[in-house]
Amino acid sequence: MGNRLYVGNLSFNTSKETLQEEFSAAGEVREIAIPTDRETGQPRGFAFITMGSDQAASAAIAQLNGKNIDGRALKVNEAEERPQRSGGGGGGGGYGGGGRGR
């Protein structure tokens, strides 16, 4: 198991400080990232938390998955690595309009 966690179903009012306090009860917290919407700056309702060890990550899942914080039941599990994106563009499109109904 890795030490990076995905925390879902966050209230938009939940702060990094609240997460630090809750997750540090399970072990060392190295990093907390709460992604925000590019246009509005509002939190997107989830976070990534890097714990100090695999054991701390396991303890955090056991202690905090389903825990109610700021009116929401958290979903805590191991973060999955994002698949590698290829550098190519979307392509496609460009089909001529002819040929239909002829």
Image (cartoon, rainbow, N blue to C red):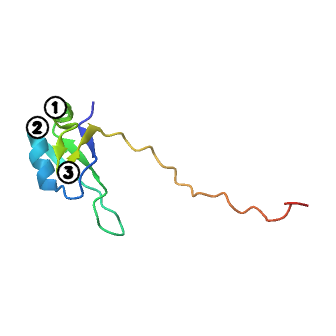
Judge left or right: residue 57 versus residue 82: left
Residue at which label 1 appears: 59
Residue type at tag 1: Ala
Residue at which label 3 appears: 32
**Along the polypeptide, which appears first: circle 1 or circle 2?**
2
Task: Kindly identify the residue that appears in the image at 17 percent across and 36 percent down.
Answer: 60
Outermost bottom residue: 39
**Along the polypeptide, which appears first: circle 3 or circle 1?**
3
Task: Kindly identify the residue that appears in the image at 45 percent across and 45 percent down.
Answer: 84
The image's mark for residue 27 is: 2
- Distance from disc 3 to disc 2, alpha carbons, whole Å, reads 13 Å
Give the secondary structure at mark 3: strand
Task: Pinpoint residue 89: horizontal percent, then vertical percent.
Answer: 57, 58
Asked if the residues shown at circle 1 and circle 2 are in contact, with their CB atoms under 8 angstroms apart, the answer is yes
Residue type at tag 2: Gly
Task: Pinpoint residue 16: horizontal percent, then vertical percent.
Answer: 16, 55
Asked if the residues shown at circle 3 and circle 1 are in contact, with their CB atoms under 8 angstroms apart, the answer is no
